[in-house]
Image (cartoon, rainbow, N blue to C red):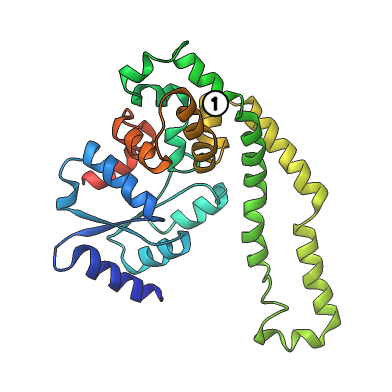
Amino acid sequence: MSCAALRDSIRQEVIGAQQKRIFLVEGTDDVSAWQILLNRFVPDWEARWGIAQAGNKAKILCLLDLEPDWLGLVDRDEWDQAAIETNTRNRPNLRVLRRFCLENDLIDPDELWPAIPAVQQATLAGGQATLATALQTQLDRYLRHGALWTVVSPLWTGLRALGFKEALASEDSLQTAQDDVEIRRILHEWDELLDPERIFADFATQLASARAAPVSEQYAQWVHGKHFWQQVVNPAMTKLFWQMSEAKRRIEILRQIPKPADLQPVFDALAA
């Protein structure tokens, strides 16, 4: 579906004839999560906004270019600081989460504990410290994954900027295919970008930074929150507290967590 067609579909399905702006998020889980958060922390938001999932970052960017009055929110996950600055420079209607992704607001035991019902808290020997230990025993494994993610994810952007793979493997590359010198030049550019020793050294540097960060920052910035929530937090809560599906537990936690300070800029934008 083209960007214009997606824009028209969102207009028809979400706002119809109403005089509302659209708040764009990436996925369907984001829609349900933000509906809960906005109902709690932004009174009357539905009088001004409709919320819709665009599918991915690229679609959010093209929709915002078509509709400057809409607001778009993307996860930080795949973007380094240079990508954030590039994509926000000319889009005042784009917001980037301060944490890795929205689920990073659901994984820090200091923030998670107040969202657990008091009756359940009372059943856990050792209380919050027991929950924190259960999560932190897995933390370093996910710090390694997060550090590697931050190094590898920008490589795709870099390869695309160098014409991968269209420079050598597209209908337009027929002429290039006749020029051995040009083929070698392009391959050399790709090879320089994917230098394994440099990439591994960058990974080691990022991992050292992650391990040196305060624990609260590790949970916020250095682990893939969605994976950590699904693979560590939810199973730990099932073991320590009560059986519940991952989707339902996510909803219940979102309904109870204290107001996330890192999301305040988005709340403010949607309160306007």
Could you tell me which quadrant the N terminus lies in? bottom left
In the image, residue 240 above or below residue 204: above
Q: Is residue 254 left or right of residue 162?
A: left
Whether residue 86 appears in this view of the structure is yes
Counting from the top left corner in percent of width and height, residue 205 is at 72, 36
- The residue closer to the viewer here, 220 or 145, is 145
**Which residue does the image show at 35% across and 22% down from the upper left?**
114
The quarter of the picture where residue 25 lies is: bottom left
Counting from the top left corner in percent of width and height, residue 188 is at 82, 66
- The residue closer to the viewer here, 85 or 155, is 155
- The residue closer to the viewer here, 124 or 138, is 124
Query: So how many labels did they put on this image?
Result: 1
The quarter of the picture where residue 123 lies is: top left
Q: Residues within 10 Å of mark 1 (few under 14, many from 20)?
A: some
In the image, residue 149 above or below residue 138: below
Q: Farthest residue toward the top?
A: 126
**Which residue does the image show at 34% across and 76% down from the upper left?**
5
Query: Disc 1 marks which residue?
Result: 135
Q: Is residue 142 left or right of residue 45?
A: right
In the image, residue 104 above or below residue 45: above
Q: Farthest residue toward the front?
A: 243
In the image, residue 214 above or below residue 8: above
Whether residue 98 appears in this view of the structure is no
**Which residue does the image show at 42% across and 35% down from the upper left?**
105
Q: Is residue 142 left or right of residue 262?
A: right
Counting from the top left corner in percent of width and height, residue 102 is at 42, 42
- The residue closer to the viewer here, 121 or 208, is 121
Q: Is residue 232 left or right of residue 54?
A: right
Look at label 1 and name its amino acid: Leu
Q: Is disc 1 placed on a helix, strand or loop?
A: helix
